[in-house]
Image: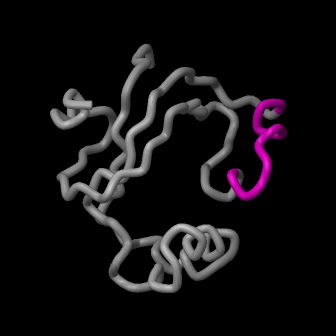
Amino acid sequence: MAYRGPLAIHAGKNTKFLSLCAQEPFRNVLLSHFGDGWYSNDLPLGAVVCTAELVKVELMTPELIATVAEPERSFGLYEPGRFIWRLRNIRPLDPVEWRGFQGLWNWDALDDE
């Protein structure tokens, strides 16, 4: 993928893995960001939740994967042949309800930043 630049991060509506939120390390991270109400229906689903800048994309190798520490490792699918996206200037947003799509797509509000 050649794209580098601004991104809007979208939280999908799929709740298939929502039960993972009650397990560590997810529970602790959710508590620190959302407080005691994280387990309710208050999680932002079907919304843009932050913006960031994509600065680098790296192919995952066993050597690169070995450098990923917890809890980050638990939040991704780190396998050889997949990709790590390096982000900077991550800015949380009040959730903006929006329909998302698989892959990269244009979000007009991102142009207004």
Residue 2's place in the image compared with 23, above or below, is above
Count the marks.
0
Residue 62 in which image quadrant: top right
Relative image position of residue 6 (x, y in whole percent): 37, 27
x, y percentage for residue 94?
31, 58
Q: Nearer the viewer, residue 83 or 6?
A: 6
Residue 44 falls inside the magenta stretch: no
x then y, percent, for residue 83 = 58, 31
The correct choice, above or below, for 78 with respect to 6 in the image is below
Q: Quadrant of the N terminus?
A: top left
Residue at the image position 33 percent from the left and 37 percent from the top: 103
> What predominant SS class does the magenta segment belong to?
loop
Q: Is residue 6 shown above or below 20?
A: above
Residue shown at 46% from the left, 75% from the top: 18
Left or right of residue 70: residue 91: left
Q: Is residue 55 left or right of residue 91?
A: right
User: Which quadrant, please, contains the C terminus?
Assistant: top left
The magenta region covers 63-72
Q: Quadrant of residue 64?
A: top right
- Residue 63, given in percent of the width and then of the height, sits at 83, 31
Residue drawn 54% across and 31% down?
88
User: Residue 41 is drawn in which quadrant?
Assistant: bottom left
Q: Is residue 39 above or below residue 16?
A: below
Name the image colouring: one colour
Identified at 69% across, 35% down, the residue is 80
Q: Is residue 71 magenta?
A: yes
